[in-house]
Image: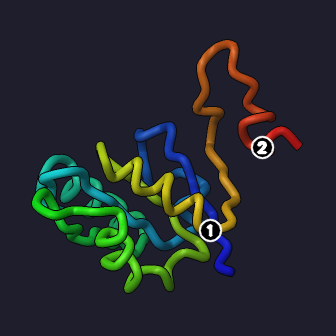
Amino acid sequence: MNTLRAQAVTDGSNLGACDFFEKMSNVIIVHGVGGNPGENWFPWLKKELELAGCNVLAPQFPTPENQTLDKWFAVFEKYSGYLNDVILIGHSLGGCFILNLLEKFTAKAASKEPPVRDGWDYVTIVTGGS
């Protein structure tokens, strides 16, 4: 089974200076329903991450007609070789798809800062209660 290490980006400023970008070189950007890799902020982020030395992948998923989770997984299959060390970034339904990926693969989650609200127990969230 693959081990997937997901990295949460909580500070968008000065991306090249973030420690985790120096340790992880693959980034996958997942668009949402009706989306594509060439819209929204995806091209800007791809360029910035490439300048920081990352290998950035932005697959085109089937949308909006006849889209299913199985069809999205079929597209993602050719990118599964990048899952050992990857930063996953999702927009809209792309974030939900990433959650489905995390259900299929063993994950180690990390973030620069706890991305939680007051009253949430960060340690429990990160460790899964163990």
> Does residue 96 sit above or below 69 in this rendering?
above
* Numbered disc total: 2
- Percent across and percent down for residue 88 are 46, 59
Residue at 15 percent across and 54 percent down: it is 35
- Please state which of residues 24 and 100 is positioned toward the viewer in this rendering: 100
- Please state which of residues 46 and 17 is positioned toward the viewer in this rendering: 46
- Percent across and percent down for residue 95 are 39, 48
Question: Could you tell whether 124 is left or right of 118 in the image?
Answer: right
Query: Which residue, given by chain and number where applicable, does mark 1 sit on?
Result: 105
Q: How is the image coloured?
A: rainbow
Question: Could you tell whether 100 is left or right of 39 in the image?
Answer: right
- Percent across and percent down for residue 116 are 61, 27
Question: Could you tell whether 25 is left or right of 2 in the image?
Answer: left
Question: Could you tell whether 70 is left or right of 86 in the image?
Answer: left
Q: Amino acid at mark 2?
A: Gly
Quarter of the image with the N terminus is bottom right
Residue at 33 percent across and 53 percent down: it is 94
Q: Earlier in the sequence, mark 1 or mark 2?
A: 1
What is the distance, in whole Å, between disc 1 and disc 2 at their CAs? 15 Å
Give me the disc on residue 13.
none
Quarter of the image with the C terminus is top right
Q: Picture quarter containing residue 31?
A: bottom left
> Does residue 92 sit above or below 70 in this rendering?
above
Residue at 42 percent across and 45 percent down: it is 14
Q: Amino acid at mark 1?
A: Phe
> Under tag 1, what secondary structure?
loop
- Please state which of residues 51 and 87 is positioned toward the viewer in this rendering: 87
Q: Picture quarter containing residue 107?
A: bottom right
> Which residue is outermost to the top?
119
**Disc 1 residue crowd, few under 14, some 14–19, many 20+, Cα 10 Å:** some
Query: Which residue, given by chain and number where applicable, does mark 2 sit on?
Result: 128
**Disc 2 residue crowd, few under 14, some 14–19, many 20+, Cα 10 Å:** few
